[in-house]
Image (tube, helix red, strand yellow):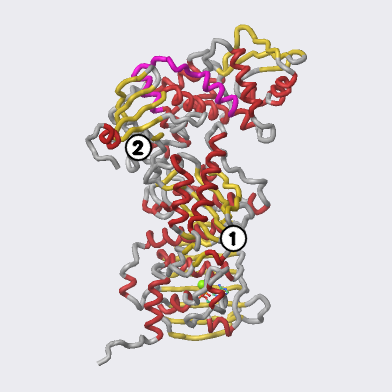
């Protein structure tokens, strides 16, 4: 007897539904895509009990007439493609015509829709794939789709749903993905009646990102200038060196506006980041790829998450180049990165998105060294260390209790720093010289407060000794770590300096004898232009005649026997800034790096407690892994590498 049977349509839909809508977040993906395809400007997503009890999407898009409203519930009913050729160049999110029938077959489903000019709209009710009723709908133009009791009729699938919190986390993550790619669309998300996200429309992508990830993280992003290589256009924002995550959840990439994952893209990112990314870590990216719809196939993954590029190498290349170019440009700046600044805010952008602060923090969760230790660096050459993994993630954040950043500062267990000694660095910055009022103001710049802004718990390092009075040798769990004491000091002082600047008081020392500086007319102009920056940095300098300046004070932590020569260096540094880009911030950074170079001497002999304090201060820095000039502060040789070098382990 024949065993093969054609499934009844309703059952076939349910089977297919499992592919398309495996969980509430998938409904959100499909329905939001439909709303975007329908040209909506406002999209509301309401979820109850993780979206399992209910998902409702309200949009102000085109709506449907009655015929289309009925038709859209049929399988393979779509308005988006017509011919085989259309399938080769898809310009919409949807194209399979299976989302709505699938959703309707596994839920208690309601569709209410109305076209803008229509006198009356249509409301359709479907229960587990069975049409219950059709009636007039008098609501606003646009479409409302509601799916209740997901999988109520497919217990086998319902079993696979996770907790309500986890499901909701996925729902939120899904909406965030769409929200980032569509800043011009306003999004609202509620859960159990509570507002979770409210993102007003904006023309500024960074504004939208900021609304989702918070100021702190957004301000550290680098802008990827739009570039096209062999038909692949790349733009967006990426994290600078030292910004990474232990999972892919903040590695978001879009192809023609569709959030996708692809091996070519991942390779491109990895290549682009090169040494700026530690092995096993993932970058933070909001990267947009635009290319001809004929150059790839989206019809390869049930959830449309993956695509097949006809020429994956071009994509990989374009991404790798854009990323490395962006990182290199950023590294040219003294801070190691050019913070992404938004252009003048558009009127819409000026409104602050109503995203509860606590939710923003979930994205920018501080580094937690206990769960994210420094990892081994395997390549054959000793590698600069990169920042350890941050614990944050987009969706997992829901399951992670919030932590106050300052709590995450943990001293290495084997490196015990007496409380008094821990202050060494702040003493150095201000305390060594006259304790002026400025010092008191600069107090927030000490290590403990720096930890509040961007903490990074020091891993366990045991100091073994110091080589050439410069390289501190340390034992770590992973192997041998070397710290360039001079570079580390520069980094610490630089960040201290910048913070003091931001909090309004740079400690300075009054010179016993003011210095008179004779300059060329060109340098005189340069100094005059930069007087505000110089003053803000504790250098009291004023014109004292034609091409002559009088200098009254210098930054207090400067260690120089020849202040005049140091000032020459400052002038040199300032003149190397191209006039186009010399903002106050850049000038300040140029002066600050020069000051920091002169703030330490390589042959300073530091005691073990002083070194420990330096290490602690270094790990309290925002960018601990390179000095303000971009050179590494820490280099690690893994035990495996040592074993290979000594022939205890086979190479490779
Ligand atoms: P697809 O998106 O692949 O076309 P769907 O099942 O998701 O398939 O939707 C079927 C059709 O229903 C769409 O092609 C579109 O014409 C219509 N539709 C769905 N959602 C909306 C909406 N929110 N607004 C207007 N039309 C919609
Ligand atoms: Mg669709």
Of residue 121 and residue 372, the one placed in the foreground of this image is 372
Is residue 215 among the parts visible in the rendering? no
Range shown magenta: 589-616
**As drawn, which residue projects farthest toward the right?**
546
Label 1 crowd bin: few (<14), some (14–19), many (20+), radius 10 Å: some
* Distance between the alpha carbons at the discs numbered 1 and 2: 50 Å
Quadrant into which the C terminus falls: top left
Q: Residue at x 52, y 71 (%)?
A: 94
Residue 610 colored in magenta in the image = yes
When asked about the image quadrant of residue 2, the answer is: bottom left
Q: Residue at x 36, y 23 (%)?
A: 472
Label whose residue precedes the other's in the sequence (1 or 2): 1
* Label 1 vs label 2, nearer the camera: 2
Please tell me whether residue 46 is drawn above or below residue 209 in the rendered image. Answer: below
The location of residue 223, given as percent across then percent down, is 57, 45
When asked about the image quadrant of residue 25, the answer is: bottom left
Identify residue for label 2: 380
Label 2 crowd bin: few (<14), some (14–19), many (20+), radius 10 Å: some
Q: Does the residue at mark 1 contact the one at mark 2 (Cβ under 8 Å)?
A: no
Identify residue for label 1: 186
Quadrant into which the N terminus falls: bottom left
Please tell me whether residue 603 is drawn above or below residue 51 in the rendered image. Answer: above
Residue 405 colored in magenta in the image = no
Q: Secondary structure at mark 2?
A: loop
**Looking at the magenta stretch, what is its main secondary structure?**
helix
Is residue 301 among the parts visible in the rendering? yes
Q: Residue at x 49, y 57 (%)?
A: 196
Q: Secondary structure at mark 1?
A: strand
């Amino acid at each position: 007897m024949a065993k093969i049977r054609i499934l009844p349509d309703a059952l076939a839909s349910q089977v297919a539904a499992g592919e398309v809508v495996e969980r509430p977040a998938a409904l959100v993906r499909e329905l939001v895509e439909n709303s975007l395809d329908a040209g909506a400007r406002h999209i509301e997503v309401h979820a109850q009990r993780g979206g399992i009890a209910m998902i409702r999407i309200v949009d102000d898009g085109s709506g449907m007439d009655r015929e289309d409203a009925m038709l859209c519930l049929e399988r393979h009913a779509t308005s988006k493609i017509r011919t085989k050729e259309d399938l080769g160049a898809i310009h919409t999110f949807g194209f399979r015509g299976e989302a709505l029938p699938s959703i309707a077959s596994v839920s208690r489903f309601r569709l209410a829709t109305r076209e803008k000019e229509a006198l009356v709209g249509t409301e359709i009710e479907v229960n587990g794939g069975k049409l219950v009723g059709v009636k007039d709908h008098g609501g606003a133009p646009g479409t409302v789709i509601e799916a209740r009791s997901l999988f109520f009729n497919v217990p086998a699938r319902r079993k696979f749903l996770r907790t309500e919190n986890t499901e909701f986390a996925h729902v939120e993550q899904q909406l965030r993905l769409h929200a980032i790619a569509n800043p011009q669309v306003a999004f609202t998300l509620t859960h159990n009646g509570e507002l979770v996200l409210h993102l007003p429309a904006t023309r500024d992508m960074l504004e939208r990102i900021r609304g989702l990830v918070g100021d702190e993280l957004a301000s550290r992003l680098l802008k990827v200038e739009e570039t096209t290589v062999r038909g692949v256009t790349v733009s967006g924002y990426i994290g600078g060196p030292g910004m990474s995550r232990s999972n892919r959840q903040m590695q978001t990439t879009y192809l023609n506006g569709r959030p996708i994952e692809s091996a070519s893209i991942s390779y491109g990112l990895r290549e682009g980041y090169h040494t700026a990314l530690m092995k096993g870590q993932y970058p933070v990216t909001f990267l947009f790829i635009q290319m001809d719809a004929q150059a790839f196939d989206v019809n390869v993954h049930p959830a449309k998450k993956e695509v097949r590029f006809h020429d994956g190498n071009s994509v990989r290349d374009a991404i790798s180049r854009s990323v490395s170019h962006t990182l290199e440009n950023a590294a040219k700046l003294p801070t190691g990165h050019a913070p992404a600044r938004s252009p003048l805010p558009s009127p819409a952008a000026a409104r602050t998105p109503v995203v509860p602060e606590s939710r923003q923090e979930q994205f920018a969760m501080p580094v937690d060294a206990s769960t994210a230790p420094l990892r081994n660096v395997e390549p054959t050459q000793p590698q600069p260390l990169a920042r350890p993994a941050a614990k944050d993630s987009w969706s997992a954040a829901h399951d992670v209790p919030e932590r106050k950043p300052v709590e995450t500062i943990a001293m290495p267990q084997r490196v015990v720093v007496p409380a008094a000694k821990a202050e060494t660095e702040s003493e150095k910055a201000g305390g060594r010289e006259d304790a002026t009022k400025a010092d008191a103001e600069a107090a927030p710049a000490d290590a403990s407060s720096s930890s509040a802004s961007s903490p990074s718990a020091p891993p366990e390092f045991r100091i073994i000794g110091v080589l050439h009075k410069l390289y501190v040798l340390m034992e770590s769990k992973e192997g041998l770590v070397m710290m360039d004491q001079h570079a580390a000091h520069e980094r610490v002082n630089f960040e201290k300096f910048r913070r003091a600047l931001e909090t309004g008081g740079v400690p300075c020392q009054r010179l016993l004898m003011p210095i008179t500086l004779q300059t060329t007319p060109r340098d005189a102009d340069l100094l005059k232009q930069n007087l505000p920056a110089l003053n803000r940095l504790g250098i009291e300098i004023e014109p004292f005649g034609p091409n002559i300046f009088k200098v009254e004070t210098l930054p207090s932590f400067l260690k120089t026997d020849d202040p005049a020569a140091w000032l020459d260096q400052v002038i040199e540094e300032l003149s190397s800034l191209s006039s186009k880009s010399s903002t106050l911030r850049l000038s300040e950074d140029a002066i600050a790096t020069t000051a920091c170079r002169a703030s330490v001497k390589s042959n300073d002999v530091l005691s073990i407690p002083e070194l420990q304090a330096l290490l602690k201060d270094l790990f309290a820095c925002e960018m601990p892994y390179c000095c303000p000039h971009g050179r590494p502060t820490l280099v690690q040789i893994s035990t495996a590498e040592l074993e290979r070098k000594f022939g205890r382990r086979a190479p490779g």
